[in-house]
Image: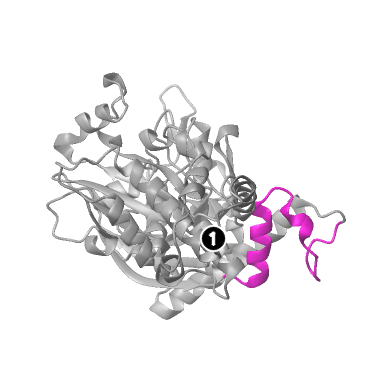
Amino acid sequence: MANPVQTTNDPESNQILASDLLTADENANYASLTDALEQTVFESFDDGLYIGMMSGTSLDGMDAVLCQFAADMSHKEQTQQPMQLLATYSQDFPPRLREVLLALCQPNGIQALTPSAGEPNNQPNSELDWFGWASKAYGEFASEVVNNLLQQSNTDSESVLAIGCHGQTVRHRPQMGFSLQLVDANVIAERTGISVISDFRRRDMAVGGQGAPLVPAFHQALFADPDSTRVLLNLGGIANITVLPASDHAANDYTDSGYADNDTPDNHSHVVGYDTGPANLLLDAWTALHTDNDYDAGGAWAQSGQVIEPLLNQLLEHPFFARSYPKSTGREEFNLEWLQEELQRFDHASAHIRYSSADVQATLTELTAISASAQIHLFVQSHKNSAVYVCGGGALNDYLMTRLQAHLPHCHVTTTASLGLDPAWVEAVAFAWLARQTLMGETGNLPAVTGAKKGVVLGQVCFA
């Protein structure tokens, strides 16, 4: 760490340390602060332990990972693995917290909540009160998850440099320049004794970005291959792609894909990434509504149905699919209420068509597959060395994977397990990496992905 700020008190420039101006008690506090800073802000954070946390749009649970990154992840000749996944842990949301989070995801959704003891009891219900209650409850739950991860992995909290906790997105309005992630990082820092980085999206939005998706920068750091084009397809609640072009094809790929010559991303941003449409969000919601299951395991229920082609075409008329990238979406646009309204419209216009709830599930699965593959086709041609690697919960949906392969006959469609990282943990690891970027003072966004004017350091730090 640099010496304390110095000043002069005579023409001959005799220097007086700032600490010389303090009382004995103040000097002790000053020394403690200096020591604390040397152990936090000014320490090298490149190869320590990090925890990453993620709870996605589907709200099916919270994932946490303990991992360690190589000091120089960009050095392709290194013998050390760029990232080691040391431990993983996942836990379902407490039912009441999940119910409140789902209500907060919809405008005025909390009006249907009936308060219990210890919960906001204002009438009419106040979204701000419920937001505050859920922020603390989320923080308490996340702390429990972290402590369980530490206990099961026999890891001392003092050996973990930071937690990257995305929080729960309850409102994402990029067209209005804001995004709200619900989490009280102060609670997590206090309950775990570990510094927490959160609120990753809004700094990108402050420089004109969508604030999403954020994981492409991590995909680039961990998965890019100079000899082949790789597409990472994340199938969470929402589907999103990251295109990692082969180095020698990068400039041509992006000029062909809609960039003018002077708009081609620089070497730091030879990546395209954006949301392609709904995935597990609608699949899980429809499954839960019509079966006793929370999700369609393996896509077996969808596979038992038949795709309703006229309905599929109607759903694809949603304005989001026609928007140019960068773009992002969420529950605000795709939700069960939207689907039910579309079904009512379809029934009115096509009363002669008979279908089952399984047929709707098959159609929703096809909606995810066709909307994602259509975007992948913009960047991957049959004559190129390319592959699609799927991560997120949708990677476990065998029927969806089959449909993706059918729409991408010239690509090898597999999961990120082929690249050494289980598809279930990719996003949580990404937020551990983003926390590391923040503490190192390195940028975490890719302007070509989010539409931001420049790369910026993301997140806010809550020191333990």
Q: Position of residue 374 (x, y in %)?
A: 35, 43
330 sits left or right of 429 in the view = right
**Residue farthest toward the front in the current orientation of the protein:** 352
Instruction: Indicate left or right for 462 with 245 as reference.
Output: right
Q: Residue at x 26, y 26 (%)?
A: 255
Q: Residues within 10 Å of mark 1 (few under 14, many from 20)?
A: few
**Magenta residue check for 108:** yes
The structure's colour scheme is one colour
**Which residue corresponds to mark 1?**
355
- Name the one closer to the observer, 296 or 203: 296
Q: Position of residue 408 (x, y in %)?
A: 27, 50
Highlighted magenta segment, given as a residue range: 93-122
Q: Where does the image place residue 345, in percent across and percent down from the top left?
A: 63, 46
65 left or right of 85 in image: right
Q: Secondary structure at mark 1?
A: loop
* Up-down relation of residue 172 to residue 339 (above or below): above
Q: Is residue 259 magenta?
A: no
Quadrant of res 109:
bottom right
Q: Relative to 222, say whether 138 is above or below.
A: below
In the image, residue 261 sits, relative to residue 75, either above or below, namely: above
Q: 387 or 204, which lies in front?
A: 387
Q: Nearer the viewer, residue 132 or 9?
A: 132
| Residue located 55% across and 37% down the image | 174
Residue 425 can be seen, yes or no: yes
Q: Is residue 55 visible?
A: no
Q: Position of residue 99 (x, y in %)?
A: 67, 65
